[in-house]
Image (spheres, coloured by chain):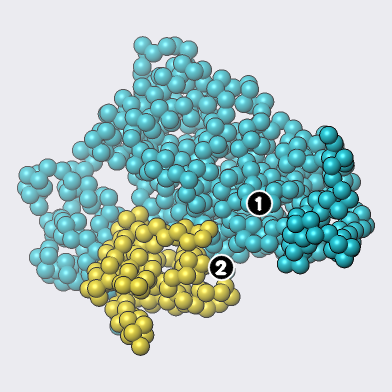
Amino acid sequence: MKDKDILSDVDRKIIAGQGFGVFNDPFGRKLVQLHKLGILDSWTIGQINKRVDKKLRKEVFRGIPFKPPQLHSGEIILGADEKRQPIKSFVQYMNAGSLLVANTGSGKTTLVSFYAAQVAGLVKGMWFVDLRKKEFRMLRSGFGQRGIDLNIIRSRKFKINPLQVSLQVDPYEYASTIADVLVKVLNLPPRASVLLSSSIIELYKKFNIFDGGKKYPTLFHLFEAVRLNRAANSQARQAVLDNLEALLLAFGTEMLGYYRGWEVHELAKRHIVFELTGQSEAGKDLVLNYLVAAELISRISRGISNRGMDLWMAIDEGQRLFSQRKESNTHSGNSITDLAGLVRGTGAGLFVSVLTPDDLSNRIPAITSTKIMGRCGSIAEYQAAGQYMGLNKEQVIWCAHHMVPGLFVGQVGEGPWRYPFLLKIPQMKQLPVVTDQQADESLKPLESLTVEPVEFSNWSAVDCITVQNEIEAKSQAANQLTDSELRLLQAVVDNPMQPSSSYVKLAKISPNTLSKLRPVLIDRGFIREHLMDSGNRGRSRRVWEPLGAAKEIFSSQPSERSSSV
Amino acid sequence: MRGEAFHNSIVDQAGRIFTSHRWEVYMEYRYPCSAVTTYLDIFAVRGCWKIGCEVETTPRHILDNAVKAAIAGIPLLVIVPSRKLQRLGRRTIESSDIAGVSMTKVLLLSQLEHELANFERERIS
C-alpha cells in the first residue's frame, strides 16, 4: 500500500514540518503531541498548516536545495550559514578524518587555516603538511599571539632516523613495520620486505637495541648491510640498493644521518609545519610515512584506543600522495592510505585536502567521515565529490552553478544531524610573510630534543661508511676530561637537577674551579643549565641537567668508572 | 613522566609540596570532562577539593592548558621556572577573552606552598 493511501494531509504536513524542524520549539512539540493523540480540531490543524506552509513558502523562495544546518553546539565554528549565523561542531568530530575537495583558488588553504586556528588550542599537537606550497608557515604570527609556538621545518631541516624504534614499541615489531613502509615507499618487490626486515633485525642485534640500546642504526647502515649481503636474492637486493641509494643521496647525512633523530612522540606534542616542497615524491612519502607510522605504532603499543583527539594532522594538496593510479601501479599499494584508516582509533585526526576527486584513492572517502566540497572544475567532479556526501542531482547542479571561492558544502561525520549543508568561510586577512630565516629560527625549541648525529666520512653509495666505534668514542671523550671535570660531571650525573652551588660539596671541588668548569661542560654538551627563580626578588638558581654525552661516560662498568675518576 | 628532565624535576618537587599539605597526588592524570580529555601533570585531591597542576617551561601551552581546565571546570595552577615566563603566562591569560581561564594561576615553584595555604583558607572560610 502506498503512503498516499494511508497518510492524511495533516500527517504529510507533520512529516514535512519535522523535516524542516518547524516543531522544535515547546509549542511545536505540543502540536506534534496533539497529532499523535489524535486531537485534531480545526484550531490545531490550522496551527500545523500555518507553520508548515510558512516554512514551505520560505523554502521555495530561498532557492537553495540544502537544509538549513541544525548544528548549534560545539567548540569550533565550521563556517557561517546563509543568515551569517555560526555553524558549530565539536572538535572530536574531526577525530574521524576529514576530506576537502575543491579546485585551486576556491579557499582550501583558507578553510584549513580557519579550522586550524580554532583546533590549535584544543589539541596537544598539530601537524601541517605542506606538500607543494609554503602557506601554512604564515599561521605562525597568529598562533604566536595566542601563546602557541608554531615550529616550521623546511624540507632540508629534518633530523630523522626512520630506523629509530618508537616509544614503547618492541624492536622486532618495529623492524617488520618499517620494512613494510620502506617497501611501499620505495616501490620494492614484495620479496624485498623479507630482506629489509631481516637486515634491520641484524642491525638491531649489532647495535644492542634488543638489550635496551638507544643508539639506532640509520638507513645508511641498512644500505651497507644490504650491499654486503651478497647471498640475498639478487633482484630484491638490487631493487633495495637502487631505490635506497637515490633516496640517501637526495636526503644526505644532514637529514638522515642520526643515530637518534627527533623522537616522533615528542613532535606529536608540538604544533609543527612540515614543508616537503622540493623533495622527490619518494622523499615526501618516506618522511610522511615514517612520521605517521612511528607515531601510530607507538600509540597502539601504548594501548591507546578510542580516545579523544590530541593530534590533528592536516595534509594540504594531497592529490599525488593519495593517488589511485599510484596505489594500483605499485607492488604493495600505498602505505599512507593503509595507515590513514588507523588514525581515528589512536586519537589522531586527519584532514586531507585535494584538488579533484579524479584519481583520488578509493580508500580516502571511505575512511574520512567529515566531507567538505568547494568549487570544482566540472560537473563530473561535482558528481564524484557529491557522491561522498550523498548529494542529489538537484544539489549537484545547484553547486555547479553557484559555488564561489569561500563557499563550501559540508557534512559532519558525527552527531544527530548529518545532512549536507552550505557554509561560508570568512576571508583570511593578509598574513605576514615568514621568511626562511624566521622559519629556521622557529626550530629553536626543537633543539632541546636529544639528537645524536653519526660521524660519516663522506658517505657515498659506492664507498663503505666508517662509523666511529662507540667504545673508542666514549673513552676518547672521558680521556679528554680533567680529573676535576670528571668529578664534577659524575656529581651532576649522580645528583641531577641540583642548584650549581651544591655541586661544590658533592664533587669536592672549590667554588672557583666550579665556576671555571661550568662554561666548559656546557659548551662541550655534557650539561644543560636551567634558570629557576625562587621568589619575587633575588638571583635565579642555576639547575644543572646531565646530558646524554655525560651519562654515556659513566654508563661503562663500575670498576672502569671508579678507576677513571 | 612524559616531559624533559627539567620539567619532570619541577613536577616531582611540586608533587612533594602538595603531599606535604596532605593532598592526594596523581601524576600524569587523565581527566575526561564532556568532550575534552585533559592530561594533567599533577591532579591533587583533598576531600572534595580538586586542583590541577601543570608545569610549563615554555609559554607555548599555558593558554591551551588554561582553556582545557576552564572547560573541565577545575582550578589550575601553572608552575613555571622563571619570573619572565610567569609574567608572560599571566599576560597571555589576562589578554585572552576566553571565559573561565581566570581560574588559572601562574606561579613560581616557591609560591606554590603559599598558594595552597591560601586556597585551603579560602575554601574553609
Q: CA distance from mark 1 to mark 2?
A: 32 Å
Which is nearer the eye, B105 or A276? B105
Q: Position of residue A368 (x, y in %)?
A: 62, 41
Q: How many marks?
A: 2
Above or below residue A38? Residue A296 is above
Q: Earlier in the sequence, mark 1 or mark 2?
A: 2
Query: Image check: A231 left or right of A502?
Result: right
Location of residue B20 (image quadrant): bottom left
Q: Mark 2: give few (<14), some (14-19) or many (20+) Cα within 10 Å.
A: many
Chain ID of residue with mark 2: A
Location of residue A27 (image quadrant): bottom right
Residue in the image at 57% along x and 69% along y: A145
- Location of mark 2 (residue): A146
Q: Quick check: can you spot residue A285? A: no
Q: Amino acid at mark 2?
A: Arg
User: Closer to the observer: label 1 or label 2?
Assistant: 1
**According to the colouring, which chain is yellow?**
B
- Location of mark 1 (residue): A416
Marks 1 & 2 on one chain: yes
Above or below residue A232? Residue B98 is below
Q: Position of residue A3 (x, y in %)?
A: 84, 40
**According to the colouring, which chain is cyan?**
A
Q: Secondary structure at mark 2?
A: loop
Which is nearer the eye, A389 or A349? A389
Query: Dividing the image into 4 quarters, which one contains the N terminus of chain A?
Result: top right
Query: Image check: A334 left or right of A346?
Result: right
